[in-house]
Amino acid sequence: MESGLRPVERSVSASNQPLVTLNSGKVMPQLGLGAYKVNQDIAVQLVQHALEIGYRRIDTAALYDNEAEVGAAIRKSGLAREEVFVTSKIWNDRHGYAEAKEAIQESVERLNIDYVDMMLIHWPCPKQDKFVETWRAFEEVLETGVVRSIGVSNFNQPHLEKLLATANVTPAINQVELHPQLAQNSLRHFNSLHGIKTEAWAPLGRARFNENVLLGEIAESLGKTVAQVIIRWHLQLG
């Protein structure tokens, strides 16, 4: 299938990308490509293209069903493994200590890139009430080195408080929906107090902002696109 992507020259360096240092001591690019809803038949080409134009962080998940393709694109890129920061996530049906350990290993094997930079619990699933024991599995896998940092996604403050009450390792990030119409001020403050970086999914508001008059006026006054204005907003949040 043709994706419409044009060949480009590889960027000389990704060193000009804004970076954040995690509580794990690892450094993560602030900007990344999310592979949600990227079909398998174009995933390799899309990720390769992203790497060619300078992206150095790729976000996938077991749910996205494209971990193998993401890994293949990274292997084909010619980049050293340490140049690309890769995040994946285990899905809701794999909560629990034993299930989570198996799910992490399966993701690592599908990616086939030696190690994963960041592994997340995709959702807390409080009705299952297993995210604490799931986190224990994450902590143990972290010690093996096959995963370099661990974090959570879509956790609200009560979920984090329960997790932190028994955790030996504080989550490096909490990935949540975050954009100008959902600034998550209280949650971001809580995360910051505990050394947890807040990471955005749907940072552009699922394209809803294209029709936002105020953002359109701001973008026009700056000679930028609405997307560029929103990305700058995110970068300035840190």
Image (cartoon, rainbow, N blue to C red):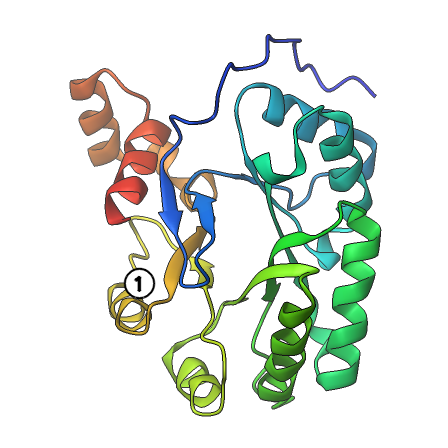
Q: Quadrant of residue 213?
A: top left
* Residue 197 position in % (x across, y down): 37, 60
Which is more toward the observer, 54 or 65?
A: 54
Query: As drawn, which residue projects farthest toward the left?
Result: 221
Q: Answer whether residue 69 is visible to the viewer in this image.
A: yes
- Residue 189 location in percent, x, y? 25, 68
Quarter of the picture holding the N terminus = top right
Q: Residue at x 46, y 46 (%)?
A: 28
Q: Is residue 62 above or below residue 205?
A: below
Q: Residue at x 41, y 42 (%)?
A: 30
Vertical position of residue 232 compared to residue 119: above or below: above
Q: Which residue is mark 1?
A: 184
149 with respect to 98 (left or right): left
| Element assignment for label 1 | loop
Amino acid type at mark 1: Gln
Q: What is the x, y in percent for residue 118?
A: 58, 57
Q: Is residue 87 above or below residue 214?
A: below
State the residue in front, 117 or 152. 117
> Does residue 158 lie above or below 181 as drawn?
below
Q: Nearer the viewer, residue 31 or 147?
A: 147
